[in-house]
Image (cartoon, rainbow, N blue to C red):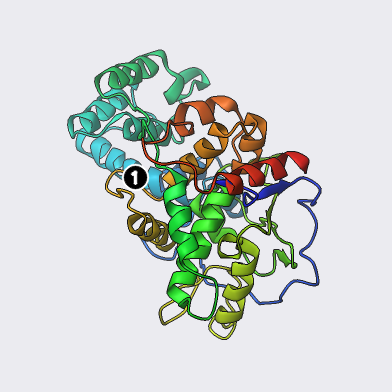
Amino acid sequence: MAHTDLVARVDENVSQQSNPSTENQEHTVPSQQSRDSTPSLPQAGTNSLPLVGRLVACQGLSKEASEIIGKSWRSGTAKQYRTYLQKWDLFCSRRNIDPLHPPIQEGINFLAELFATGIGYSCINTARSALSSIITLPGGQSFGHHSLVTRFLKGVFELRPALPRYKEIWDVSLVLRMLESWKLGSTLTLKDLTLKVTMLLALLSGQRLQTLKAFSMKSMTLTDTKCVFQINVPLKTTRPGRHTSALEFCEYTPSDDLCIVKHLKLYLNLTSPLRGDCDQLLITYSKPHRAASSDTIGRWLKTVMTKSGIDTQQFGAHSTRAAAASAAFSKKVSVDTILSAAGWSNVQTFDRYYNKPLLPQERNFGDELLIATHQAHSTV
C-alpha cells in the first residue's frame, strides 16, 4: 500500500464464489498434506488434541461427527492449544484431577503456574482459551467466562500488559528506493526477482504472510495492465459470511522498475520450467524448487528490509502491514479503503495495532505508488 498507483485493490466485483478463469495458467496442485503429518505441524482434529477427543467421545457422537468437530480448530490454533492442553493434562495427572471436569480453582491454579514460568498475558490468554475448549463448568458456564477467571486475566494484564509491538514504523520509501535500483531486465537474478516480487506484493496488498502464500497460479488472472488473485483457501480472518475478496494489482506506469505486473510476468517466465506441478505462485529460488512456506516468505521480506537499512531486530516481516497502511494513511487515503485493502474488519484494529507514526527520516519517495494503489481500492 505504499505508492498508491501500486497498491492492490480489493475487487468487490470479482465473485468470491466464481471458479478461476479458464484463461489462467493451469497447474495441478500436488496433494502434500496428510492427516496427522508431523508433530511440528499438527492438523486440526481430535488426533492432535487428545483431550478434545476424550471430551467428544463422552458425548456419544459417531466417528464422523467427532472428526468434523475436531476440524473446527484450524491447524495453527490446534498447535497452540495442544501445548497448553498437554501441560494441563500433566498438571491434572499429578493432582489426580479429572481434566475435563475440574474444580474452577484448579484451572486458575494451573494458569498461575504458567504465569510463574514467566510467560505474558497473550500466552496466558491462549491457555485460557485452550481450557475453555474442553472444560464446561456446572450450569453450562464456560471456563473462560467465569468471573474468577476473567478477574485473574485482568490481574495478569496489569502485571504483564500486552502492548503493541511497535510505537513507530519504518518508512516504505526506504524499501521502494532500494527495489527500484534493482532494474527490471535480464540482469535481475531469480533470487533478487523473488525477493522483489514478494516485497511488492506485501506492501501493495498490506496482507499477511498467510495470504501471500495463498496466491496460486490457478486463482490468478494476469493481463498487460493488472493481475487479480482469488483467495480460495481459508485464512485467519475467514469465518462464515466473511472471506478475503479478490486482490487486484494494477500496473504502475511511472516506473517499470516498480511495476508489479511487469515483474510478475518476468517471474512467471523464469519459474515456469522450475515449478513442475506446483501451483503456488511463490516458490523457492534454490533447488529443490518448491512451494515457499510462510516462514520462508517472512525471511525473504526481512532480507529486503535489511538491505534497505531497516533494523530487523526491531521490526519483523509482519511489520510490512503496518508500514504500508501507515504510509497510505499519512497520505490521506481513506480509512475505509485501507481497511478493505488489508482485510481489517474495524477501525479499532487499525488504530490500535497498525496506524503508527513513521520513524524520522526522508519520506517522499514512493508516495505516489501507495496513494494510487489505495485510491484504486476506493474506485472498485
Residue 265 percent across, percent down from the top left:
64, 72
Left or right of residue 82, residue 374 in this image: right
State the residue in front, 200 or 186: 186
- Residue 30, image quadrant: bottom right
Q: Position of residue 118 (x, y in %)?
A: 19, 33
The residue drawn where x is 69% and y is 48% is 9
The three-letter amino acid code for the residue at tag 1 is Phe
Judged from this view, the residue extending furthest toward the bottom is 273
Which residue bears the numbered disc 1?
A: 315
Q: Image check: 60 left or right of 20? A: left
Q: Quadrant of the C terminus?
A: top right
Residue 223 vertical placement versus 15 (above, below): below
Depth check: give the residue in front, 282 or 154: 282
Vertical comparison of 252 with 30: above or below: above
Please provide percent x and percent y for residue 339. 62, 35
Residue at image x 44%, y 53%?
175
